[in-house]
Each structure stands twice: as C-alpha cells, then as structure tokens.
Amino acid sequence: LEKNPPKTRPLISYELKALTTKHLAGKCDGKA
C-alpha cells in the first residue's frame, strides 16, 4: 500500500462511493 497524496484523494472518493452504495443497498434491503 503506497501512501501518496495523489493516491489518497481517489482512494477516499472510492471509499465514499462504496459507502454510499452500501448505504443505498441497505436502504433497499430494509424496504424489501
């Protein structure tokens, strides 16, 4: 795992997207 400023930004974005997707999936599961 390389700790680089330029790599940290996209990593955070990816994690945020994954979190949002998981949250949405959880909401769908709860509704279904």
Image (tube, rainbow, N blue to C red):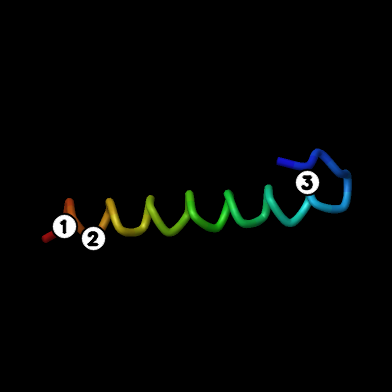
Residue 9, position as x, y percentages in the image = 78, 51
Dot 1 and dot 3 residues touching (CB under 8 Å): no
- Drawn side of residue 5 relative to residue 23, left or right: right
Residue 13: image tag: none
31 or 17, which is in the foreground? Answer: 17
Residue 8: image tag: 3
**Which type of secondary structure does the marked residue at label 3 adopt?**
helix
| Separation (CA) of disc 1 from disc 3 | 34 Å
Q: How crowded is mark 1: few (under 14 residues within 10 Å), some or many (20 or more)?
A: few
Q: Which residue is drawn at 27% across and 54% down?
A: 27
Residue 18, position as x, y percentages in the image = 49, 55
Q: Going from the N terminus, do you reach mark 3 or mark 2 first?
A: 3
Q: Going from the N terminus, do you reach mark 1 or mark 3 first?
A: 3
Q: Which of marks 1 and 3 is in front?
A: 3
**Which type of secondary structure does the marked residue at label 1 adopt?**
helix
Provide the residue designation for mark 2.
28
**Which type of secondary structure does the marked residue at label 2 adopt?**
helix
Q: Which residue is drawn at 38% across and 53% down?
A: 22
Dot 1 and dot 2 residues touching (CB under 8 Å): yes
The amino acid type found where label 2 is placed reads Cys
Provide the residue designation for mark 1.
31
- Drawn side of residue 27 relative to residue 21, left or right: left
Residue 2, position as x, y percentages in the image = 78, 42
Where's the N terminus, which quadrant? top right
7 or 19, which is in the foreground? Answer: 7
The amino acid type found where label 3 is placed reads Thr
In the picture shown, does residue 28 fall above or below 8? below
6 or 16, which is in the foreground? Answer: 6
The amino acid type found where label 1 is placed reads Lys
| Separation (CA) of disc 1 from disc 2 | 5 Å
Q: Which residue is drawn at 61% across and 56% down?
A: 14
